[in-house]
């Protein structure tokens, strides 16, 4: 197949996107596909020196403003599908999806609306709860420029301590703080506001970190995540050896089935297509709550979806080709 791998982008997760795209590009190339590398945040978006692009540590000049011009240069007759390897703003939120729609180029994963909905953590949780009947953390969301809301009072009334404060539409724990006392709230609010126009406050749910992968036509196991740090933070997510993964998770069969079912329900409630990954917390008392739906899960060497596929006997190439297959359907 003729596949356009969309890499990089302009978000805070640009480097993670390049790791995802590198793994996908190599697998597809080795699998005999005709692969083109494309970074819409660059002035020259079609990458000819692939090795140099992935290996370079030099500072890059990139911009979200290049996206429209870059996608406009694409010829839909040259590609069977675009594999979107972007993460964060302009990648997971429906922007690149809308531009590819205008060019009539098929792409992997969810469409514009489901991507935008999944990216907005606060609204997504409302849909999970009201449409799918899935438990979610209590919380509230305010503008990062809001000076009128009494944050301390709202936390006391709605979430209590500890409280998680994070950007409403970022991933990879960018800008996230867990606050245990009132004096930590405003610095955490200011930090999160650097990365988003809205800041989310939600209850911290103690217990085990679990995740459920959804790939159409496949049944995947629950994974338990045990980071070396107290929080499954950026370092633990993307540094080998900083997290232990248990796949499948050591859970009673009935509970595992319930969590998998919840992940699938969230996936469909948000209108996602092709593939995704739902993250959960499980308390010692047996409560499990969905934290978020990732409409474009990472595909790096430490990513979770490939671990789930491997546990079921699927290679990384099998996984990528299945994602392409169901996305083209």
Image: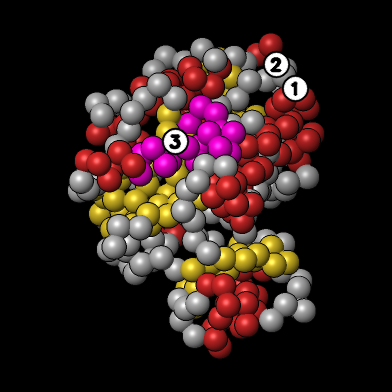
Q: Which residue is mark 2?
A: 76
Residue at 54% of width from left, 50% of height from top? 129
Under circle 3, the secondary element is helix
Q: How many marks?
A: 3
Image side of residue 114 versus residue 242, left or right = right
Camera-near label (1 vs 3) is 3
Measure how far apart labels 3 and 2 are at the Cα level.
Answer: 32 Å
The relative height of residue 168 versus residue 44 in the rendered view (above or below) is below
Residue 175 visible somewhere in the drawing: no
Q: Which residue is mark 1?
A: 103
Image side of residue 285 versus residue 66, left or right = left
Q: Which residue is mark 3?
A: 264
Q: Earlier in the sequence, mark 1 or mark 3?
A: 1
Residue at 54% of width from left, 22% of height from top? 327
- Foreground residue, 279 or 68? 279
Residue at 64% of width from left, 52% of height from top? 123
Under circle 1, the secondary element is loop
- Foreground residue, 154 or 242? 154
Q: Is residue 179 magenta?
A: no
> CB of mark 1 within 8 Å of CB of mark 2?
yes
The quadrant of the picture occupied by the C terminus is: top right
Crowd around label 1: few <14 · some 14–19 · many ≥20 (10 Å) = some
The stretch of residues the image draws in magenta is 259-275
């Amino acid at each position: 197949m003729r596949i356009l791998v969309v890499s990089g982008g302009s978000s805070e997760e640009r480097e993670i996107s390049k790791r995802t795209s590198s793994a996908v590009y190599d697998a597809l190339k080795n699998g005999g596909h005709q692969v083109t590398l494309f970074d819409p945040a660059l002035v020259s978006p079609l990458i000819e020196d692939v090795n140099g692009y992935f290996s370079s540590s030099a500072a890059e000049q990139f911009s979200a403003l290049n996206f429209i011009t870059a996608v406009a240069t694409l010829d839909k007759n040259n590609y069977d599908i675009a594999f979107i390897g972007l993460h964060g703003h302009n990648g997971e939120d429906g922007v690149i999806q809308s531009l590819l729609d205008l060019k009539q180029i098929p792409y992997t994963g969810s469409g514009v609306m489901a991507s935008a909905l999944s990216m907005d953590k606060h609204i997504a949780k409302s849909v999970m709860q009201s449409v799918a009947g899935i438990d979610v953390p209590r919380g509230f969301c305010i503008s990062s420029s809001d000076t009128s809301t009494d944050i301390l009072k709202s936390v006391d009334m709605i979430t209590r301590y500890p409280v998680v404060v994070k950007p409403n539409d970022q991933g990879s724990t960018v800008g996230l703080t867990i606050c245990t006392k009132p004096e930590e709230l405003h610095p955490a609010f200011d930090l999160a506001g650097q990365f988003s126009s809205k800041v989310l406050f939600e209850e911290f749910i103690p217990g085990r970190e679990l995740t459920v992968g959804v790939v159409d036509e496949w049944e995947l196991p629950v994974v338990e995540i045990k980071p070396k740090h107290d929080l499954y933070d950026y370092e633990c997510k993307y540094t080998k050896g900083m997290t232990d993964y248990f796949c499948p998770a050591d859970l009673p069969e009935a509970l595992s089935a319930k969590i998998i079912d919840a992940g699938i329900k969230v996936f469909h409630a948000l209108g996602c297509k092709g593939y995704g990954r739902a993250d959960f917390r499980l308390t010692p008392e047996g409560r499990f709550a969905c934290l978020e739906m990732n409409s474009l899960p990472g595909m790096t060497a430490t990513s979770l979806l490939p671990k789930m596929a491997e546990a079921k006997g699927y290679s990384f190439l099998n996984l990528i080709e299945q994602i392409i297959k169901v996305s083209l359907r």
